[in-house]
Image (tube, rainbow, N blue to C red):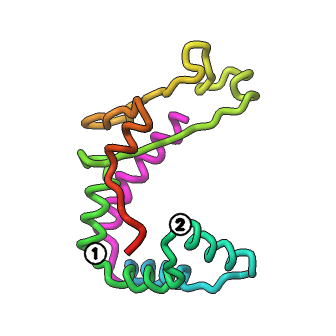
Amino acid sequence: PTFLEERLENFLSVFEETLANMPDEELQEHVEGLVTKKLESDRNIDRSCQRIMNEVLGHTYEFERRKLEAAFIRKIDRAQLQAFYKTHLSVKSATRRRFSSHVVGKAAVDAGSEAAVTPQSKGKILRTAAAGATSPAPAVEEISAFREGTKKFSAQK
């Protein structure tokens, strides 16, 4: 898991520069590719029913969500994308939040892998700081308190 964490951090730091240096034509190709994917019709009736039921169960009733998202994606410009990246994804951001969960199988534990569960760690939340982190994110000790303190967005109009 440490190797994966380091690779993820490396990708995020390198991609920031890639995004900044990406030609406008290439960025537009990525935008149109995402829009095309959003506007794809459902491949089967099960997927269609699942999409509709997600709206009903979430009490959002936005059955044209894909079209709305596609229109919104087309409106995003490079400056907005870079600002979002610097605020929420950049490894240098002070406001960045990251959650990473690793599930370790019994075979890996028995083999003594790096992420082995020890009697001291069993049932506990283990925190590790990312390499090169300037300031560690606050630890989540109490899930219910964390949820109460997060910003909520209403799904209903």
- Amino acid type shown at disc 1: Arg
Residue nearest the viewer, comparing 114 with 52: 52
Q: Residue at x 58, y 37 (%)?
A: 102
Q: Secondary structure at mark 1?
A: helix
- Compared with 24, 21 (above or below) is above
Residue nearest the viewer, comparing 5 with 83: 83
Mark 1, residues whose alpha carbon is within 10 Å: few (<14), some, or many (≥20)? some
**What range of the chain is rendered magenta?**
1-24
Q: Quadrant of the N terminus?
A: top right
State the mark number for residue 58: 2
Q: Main secondary structure of the magenta part?
A: helix
Q: Looking at the picture, how far across and down is residue 134, in whole percent? A: 25, 37
Let me know if residue 35 is in the magenta part.
Answer: no
The answer to whether residue 133 shows anywhere in this view is: yes
State the mark number for residue 119: none
Q: Looking at the picture, how far across and down is residue 69, in whole percent? A: 44, 79
Q: Quadrant of the C terminus?
A: bottom left
Mark 2, residues whose alpha carbon is within 10 Å: few (<14), some, or many (≥20)? few
Q: Is residue 113 left or right of residue 60?
A: right
Mark 1 highlights which residue?
78
Let me know if residue 5 is in the magenta part.
Answer: yes
- Compared with 143, 115 (above or below) is above
Q: Residue at x 69, y 76 (%)?
A: 49
Q: Residue at x 39, y 34 (%)?
A: 140
Q: Looking at the picture, how far across and down is residue 92, in whole percent? A: 26, 47
